[in-house]
């Protein structure tokens, strides 16, 4: 996939220039012995800068050294001070990405204020924050190069309802003494703007969530060198042979990007800067959790998914075979096809025979089938054969991913693959981080 423009880079394994390496040049063999000369603090374009020798000009050396220092100062001015964050405040979850620099020089370490060290220690030494904050360690990207700095990218999430607790932590850590502005996207960036200003003394740079989503998806795909960041399910129509396989997302355009959060947005992406929102649906992850809370008494997304994994949706839904006694052969509809979601619940006897787990499973199947059906129609209308599903609804939700894979494969007669991305819910936050680092 093409590399995005702006102040960003690839994994460290890719041969790229690290501008800050100029601070600590390699010592040429000629300087390892013999007369002691003063060494410059900057590399020349050949990799080393030698000191003046007999016949050389001291003034030339000073001018060159001064020029190198100016270049380093210019690079530093084109990037913001640490810490580097991007935030996506959704209707259900807040997603935060944090870049931890690993190439801090001795000089930088001496100049670092205690507030900055405290924030870095707190975020990187814990995997849980309070009762509900989680750092997804398995998603961490190591040795990533951003704006000439090498470090690790961390992924953190917590429920949006706990935002006041986060703002209090930000206040206690004196974050506003380091930054006055935080790059944020999602509806919450607008809804909670006043809270950030009053509780944490921070201004929000509010960014469009779909712009951030697309930019984050394309960047992470370009930054992750292995194909494991994107995958699909092989043989999705055969549960016994269904396995996860890596997929190399190269030359991706055009692609359909289906973002499943509290609601659903479907985007047609034709290039890095050419995309549109085609449609969406209000029936998304928030619908699933809200209905499960009403129907089963559960209180968290994880609890709802666990209940769904134990249930049987066919006890709740009315199937084609419940109406026809078998398949509807004329239109090729198998008997097990859902004819009416929750259709059996109009019967008192069946209502009394089902469990909370059955209700959770039927809710999950209803939401997922609806998303799959709309996505299939949009793919046909837009003439796009590559579909990528993202969003926090898919986090730890293998059941829905397999249902989506099944629906895409079955109804398209094998023409459409449902693709998934490992960092499914964090792309908006990544896009916000990239905007922070954008020198313009």
Image (cartoon, rainbow, N blue to C red):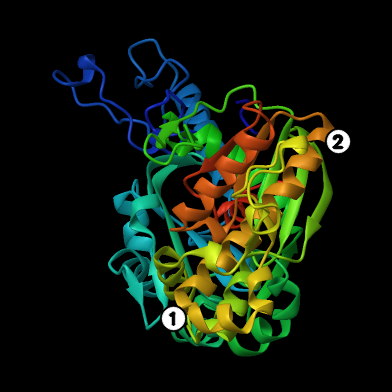
Residue 5 in view (yes/no): no
Report the side of 127 relative to 198 (left or right). left
Q: Residue at the spot x=70%, y=72% of the render?
A: 189
Comparing labels 2 and 1, the label whose residue is closer to the camera: 2
Q: Quadrant of the N terminus?
A: top right
Task: List x then y, in percent, for residue 382.
Answer: 84, 34
Disc 1: which residue: 173
Residue 212 in view (yes/no): yes
Q: Residue at the spot x=51%, y=37% of the render?
A: 237
Disc 2: which residue: 381
Task: List x then y, in percent, for residue 198.
Answer: 66, 89
- Choose the circle earlier in sequence order: 2 or 1: 1
Task: List x then y, in percent, for residue 321.
Answer: 63, 53
Task: List x then y, in percent, for residue 282.
Answer: 76, 66
State whether residue 296 is above or below residue 84. Answer: below
Element at label 2: helix
The residues tagged by marks 2 and 1 sit, at their Cα atoms, a distance apart of 51 Å
In the figure, residue 306 lies in which quadrant? Answer: bottom left
Residue placed most toward the observer, 143 or 229 = 229
Q: Residue at the spot x=58%, y=39% of the render?
A: 219
Residue placed most toward the observer, 19 or 339 = 339
Q: Farthest residue toward the front?
A: 325
The numbered disc on residue 408 is none
Give the crowd class for mark 1: few <14, some 14-19, many >=20 residues within 10 Å: some
State whether residue 20 is above or below residue 209. Answer: above
State whether residue 439 is above or below residue 71. Answer: below
Q: Residue at the spot x=59%, y=64% of the render?
A: 87
In the figure, residue 346 lies in which quadrant? Answer: bottom right
């Amino acid at each position: 996939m093409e590399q995005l423009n702006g102040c960003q880079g690839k994994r460290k394994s890719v041969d790229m220039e690290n501008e800050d390496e100029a601070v600590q040049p390699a010592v040429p063999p000629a300087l390892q012995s013999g007369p002691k000369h003063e060494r410059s603090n900057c590399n020349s374009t050949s990799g080393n800068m030698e000191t003046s020798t007999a016949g050389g000009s001291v003034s030339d050396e000073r001018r060159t050294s001064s020029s190198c220092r100016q270049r380093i100062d210019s690079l530093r001015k084109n990037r913001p001070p640490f810490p580097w964050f991007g935030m996506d405040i959704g209707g259900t979850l807040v997603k935060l990405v944090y870049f931890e620099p690993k190439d801090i020089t001795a000089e930088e370490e001496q100049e670092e204020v205690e507030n900055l060290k405290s924030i870095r220690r707190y975020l990187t030494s814990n995997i849980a924050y309070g009762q509900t904050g989680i750092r997804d360690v398995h998603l961490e990207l190591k040795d990533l190069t951003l704006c000439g700095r090498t470090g690790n990218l961390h992924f953190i999430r917590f429920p949006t309802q706990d935002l006041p607790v986060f703002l209090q932590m930000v206040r206690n850590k004196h974050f506003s003494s380091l930054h006055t502005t935080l790059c944020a996207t999602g509806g919450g960036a607008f809804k909670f703007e006043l809270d950030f200003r009053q509780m944490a003394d921070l201004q929000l740079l509010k960014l469009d969530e779909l712009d951030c989503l697309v930019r984050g998806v394309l960047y992470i795909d370009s930054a992750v060198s292995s194909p494991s960041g994107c995958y699909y399910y092989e043989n999705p129509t055969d549960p016994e042979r269904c396995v996860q396989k890596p997929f190399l997302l190269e030359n991706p355009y055009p692609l359909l990007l289906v973002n499943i959060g509290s609601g659903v947005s479907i985007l047609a992406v034709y290039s890095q800067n050419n995309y549109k929102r085609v449609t969406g649906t209000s029936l998304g992850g928030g619908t699933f959790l809200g209905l499960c809370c009403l129907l089963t008494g559960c209180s968290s997304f994880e609890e709802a998914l666990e209940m769904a994994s134990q249930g049987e949706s066919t006890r709740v839904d009315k199937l084609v075979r419940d109406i026809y006694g078998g398949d509807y052969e004329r239109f090729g509809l198998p008997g097990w096809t859902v004819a009416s979601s929750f259709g059996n619940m109009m019967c008192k006897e069946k209502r009394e025979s089902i469990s909370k787990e059955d209700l959770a499973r039927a809710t999950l199947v209803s939401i997922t089938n609806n998303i799959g059906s709309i996505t299939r129609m949009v793919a046909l209308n837009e003439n796009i054969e590559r579909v990528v599903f993202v969003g926090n609804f898919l986090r730890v939700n293998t059941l829905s991913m397999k249902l989506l894979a099944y629906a895409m494969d079955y109804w398209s007669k094998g023409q459409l693959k449902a693709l998934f991305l490992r960092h499914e819910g964090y792309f908006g936050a990544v896009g916000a981080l990239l905007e922070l680092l954008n020198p313009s």
